[in-house]
Image: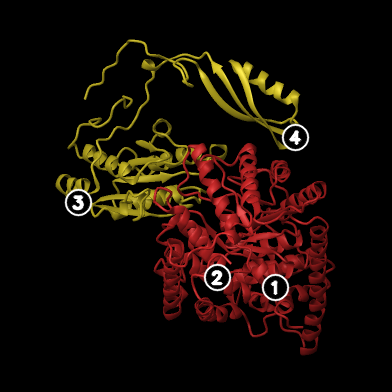
Chain colours: A red, B yellow
Amino acid sequence: MSGLFISDEQIAHARALARDITDPIFDLIAKHTTVSVERTVLRWFGVDGVGNMGAPLVNLMVDRLKAAGVLNKGAAYWYGRALRMGASSPLDAVERLTAAPLEALQPLSPDDEAKLRQEVRVEARAMAQELKDRVARRTALRHEFPPGQPPHKYVIVATGNIFDDVDQARAAAQAGADVIAVIRSTAQSLLDYVPHGATTEGYGGTYATQENFRIMREALDDESRKLKRYIQLTNYSSGLCMSEIAFSAAWEHLDMLLNDAMYGILFRDINMRRTFIDQYFSRRICALAGIIINTGEDNYITTADAYDAAHTVIASQFINETFAKRAGLEDWQLGLGHSYEIDPHRPDTLLLELSQAMLVRRCFPNAPLKYMPPTKHKETDIFFSHAYDVMADLVAVWTRQGIQLLGMMTEAMHTPLLADRYVALKSASYLHRAARGIDEEFTVREDGKIANRARLVFGKAIELLEECRRDGMVAAISRGRFGDVKREETGGKGLDGVIEKAPDYFNPFLDLMEGRP
Amino acid sequence: MTTHHTKEKQLIRAYGDRRDDGIIQLSFTLPVTASEKAKEAAKLYCQKLGLTDVKVAAVERAAEHYTFFVVYGRSGVVLDYAEIDTPEIIIKKKSFDELNAFIEEEISRRVVVFGACTGTDTHTVGIDAILNMKGFSGDYGLERYPWFEAYNLGSQVPNAELIRRAKEKNADAILVSQVVTQRDVHKDNSRAFIDEAKRQGVYGKVTLLLGGPRVDHKLALELGFDAGFGPGTKPSDVANFVVHQVLQRLGKEQKGAHYEGEPT
């Protein structure tokens, strides 16, 4: 254990506060669905492909149901109605539904309604089982070729072209990477649909599509066998299509997803209600598919100051943990985010960074955690930049981070060159090899700078959690408590995609994942 | 202010540890498997670049079919430093308090500044560093200046909206931040911004500034901006520049009074 600093009772108190804070949000979640959640349901039934204007079929169908004012019964219900009309395939179902006068359709007899739901439930169970089988094959490969020792070295590829990404990902794996992240094309989070097929054009990254996921995972499966070391793949379940991406990633058996309960609200100005509802369904899918989520608290201290706002990271981690646990995720799936971002021109920053990383480890002893490298104060002097990254490598291994994003010496200049990743991987491997177990050799004094700083930060985190409980999450966010960003409950993008559920709302996948037969 | 253009040559070469030794270091990757042959290829490559005394210091297997090299060599390239003309913003900077007092005295109203990452760019780190209260590297952001009225609209703001909102508040300056540079998207978007500024009639009336890690003053001028700010820019650099631009537009200061080498 990296320092004690604070008592178990204090940590339990933080958890209790986080539960109280999220309670009212779970009322909201239980009563609502979103267009994205309903599109996810249809994807799960196998509705794939695009219409003649390039719009995904799931969008066409859900938009039609929404326009007719009947989406509140759940897309699964209407899928069942289409089957009852004689639809022979998911595509046929979409065609029948988009052509039918939905507004005029009367309910079936109670008997037929029950039968319809039963039929759809049976199909949902089969599709959920198929998902689990696909994930089981991934788990088997992981057992056959175990991943390297943590901290798992995580690097990004971002060419915009999935086929170039594959080359770069293979090269990174050969140089020692444990996790490959394919950065998404900038602004994809604001698209209210998921693009389709393999893509070769993107800005600052590559579109997240199910086919791109499949291509990359297949290449990494192959590379894992060659290297006899399982290489993990991650992408971004965030933005307006959070749960659809989670589903596609689960189906293509990705290993991790960036998935945060508040990131979209704060940093992409996506509506609060929309985000809370979407994150819940996406996390249910991650729980089912054994996906590790990575949360985005590190972003708070790229906008706010890392020294002053350190406590907001801790408070948010407790909130993110609660959201995750209530969606069925387990400790081993919680890559709670934090980072090495304190201005290096200050004195004592190595001690301050160690303090923060030890505090996070102390609060979440069984979570892998996701440790981010410096970005905000990076300099274009690549030699200094490299030395700066190496210090983060030391802190990561010292505090037993499960997942470590490696800093690139050309951060703030361009997307990483192949050699940038190589250099970062070589030195991270060196630090991990050289210092593994260092935490067991040195005891942190309880009256020193590290411990005092940790106590101070934790105390402020408790104050913030208490404020959130007293005034509500919505009020705290509207005051800019997280990341210095202020958002209103009815502001942001995507609120019109939030729908109140009808009393007979039907979502057999949600029932299954919440443990209702 | 006058500048002296001496016609006397000033010849320079790269400096390793002795004047005119011409030593440079470089690193690069070749798409071949690490081997003696790969090392020889790296040497040849550098000779073709015009280097002599090539020393391939490191041959690293970066991946199965990629080799990373660190190389030292001598370059015979000679430059006449005296002939180089770079437009550079030279500002006689005032401190935080001095600048606020100066605005109060000379302009007598708050200076209004709007900023955003426009187009598809989502990276607000640059614009935040300049505008937000906190600032950057111990240098306060424009929001902190009592005599500035700063609006940070965040990321992915359409060019037209940024300009429209700036017009509503009679902004003195608009800051455009561009971080993502893949396929020169920052240049395309910056050109689109200038076109929009012309369409909405603010071009030439409002000071237009471009910032970002791959932006420099020269590029910004070429794209049609009044100035460009690259990596390491502090909020106070921008604050001082904007104040002098306002004074120039008010006719209280001679154009170019505080700049050297500005293109005519």
The residue identified by callout 4 is B65
Mark sitting on residue A363? 2
Residue A388 seen anywhere in this rendered image of the structure: yes
Between B233 and A364, the one lying in front of the other is A364
For residue A31, above or below residue B20: below
Residue A482 seen anywhere in this rendered image of the structure: no
In the orientation shown, which residue stands out farthest toward the top? B8
Percent of width and height locating residue A128 = 79, 71
Q: Alpha carbon of mark 3 to alpha carbon of mark 1: how far?
A: 58 Å
Circle 2: residue type: Cys
- Judged left or right of residue A417, residue B63 is right
Tell me what residue is drawn at x 43 percent, y 54 percent.
Answer: B154
Classify 10 Å Cα crowding around label 4: few (below 14), some (14-19), many (20 and above): few
User: Which circle's residue, 1 or 2, is located before the other in the chain?
Assistant: 1
Mark 2–mark 4 CB contact (< 8 Å): no
The residue identified by callout 3 is B109
Tell me what residue is drawn at x 33 percent, y 48 percent.
Answer: B139
Q: Chain of mark 3?
A: B
